[in-house]
């Protein structure tokens, strides 16, 4: 006798009420398994997809802004070496003041920094890239030692040197 036949005999030996109970229990187990194995993971993935879609949209907007900025920089007219040097030297004096020294070495400019705030440095680097068409080639920066009496964890000051490339002559 096969197992299937034995199961059929067992099933027919049950009372109608017992068959209903077993059928309901089997249905409940099937529904729970279907929920745990198919529906719950799919709903979880759907919820994560919404969050990831918004994050990706934000990244896409950032990339479009950077693309527009790069195209604007590419569209600017070429700048001569002497004009770039003047623009860079002027930006060092205006933005960094006495905290920086500017020296020219051929097609490169060296800027030595002493206690420059991170915000001022970031703004100056943007101006150097846009106005003087120069980009950092080498940077050796360290956080300045701030006296304990004036220490502010939110403000970082930097010492060091930057070497920037200039347009060729």
Image (cartoon, rainbow, N blue to C red):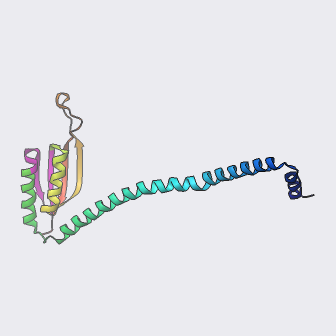
Q: Please, is residue 89 above or below residue 100 in the view?
A: below
Q: Reply above or below: 147 against 138.
A: above
Q: Does residue 9 show up magenta in the picture? A: no
Residue 141 appears at what percent x and percent y? 23, 46
Residue at point 23% right, 55% down? 138
**Which image quadrant: the N terminus?**
bottom right
The answer to which image quadrant residue 84 occupies is bottom left
Q: Quick one: 69 or 7, which is closer to the camera?
A: 7
Choose between 77 and 66: the one closer to the eye.
66
Secondary structure mostly seen in magenta is strand
Can residue 106 be spotted in the picture? no
- The residue drawn where x is 18% and y is 58% is 164
Place of residue 102 in the rendered image (x, y in percent of width and height, measured from the top left): 10, 52
Quick check: 97 left or right of 119? left
Rendering coords of residue 24 (x, y %): 72, 50
Q: Residue at x 17, y 43 (%)?
A: 117
In the displayed structure, 160 sits above or below 81; it is above
Q: Residue at x 42, y 56 (%)?
A: 50
Quarter of the image with the C terminus is bottom left
Extent of the magenta region: 95-113
Total marks shown come to 0
Residue 61 horizontal side relative to residue 35, left or right: left
């Amino acid at each position: 006798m096969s197992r299937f036949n034995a199961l059929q005999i067992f099933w027919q030996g049950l009372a109608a009420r017992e068959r209903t109970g077993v059928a309901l229990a089997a249905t409940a187990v099937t529904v729970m398994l279907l929920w745990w194995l198919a529906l719950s993971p799919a709903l979880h993935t759907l919820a994560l997809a919404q969050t990831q879609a918004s994050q990706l949209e934000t990244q896409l907007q950032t990339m479009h802004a950077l693309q527009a900025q790069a195209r604007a920089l590419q569209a600017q007219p070429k700048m001569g070496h002497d004009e770039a040097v003047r623009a860079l030297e002027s930006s060092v004096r205006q933005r960094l003041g006495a905290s920086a020294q500017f020296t020219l070495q051929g097609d490169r400019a060296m800027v030595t920094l002493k206690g420059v705030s991170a915000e001022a440095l970031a703004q100056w680097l943007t101006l150097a890239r846009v106005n003087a068409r120069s980009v950092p080639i080498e940077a050796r920066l360290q956080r300045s030692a701030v006296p304990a009496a004036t220490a502010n964890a939110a403000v970082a000051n930097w010492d060091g040197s930057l070497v920037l490339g200039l347009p060729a002559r």
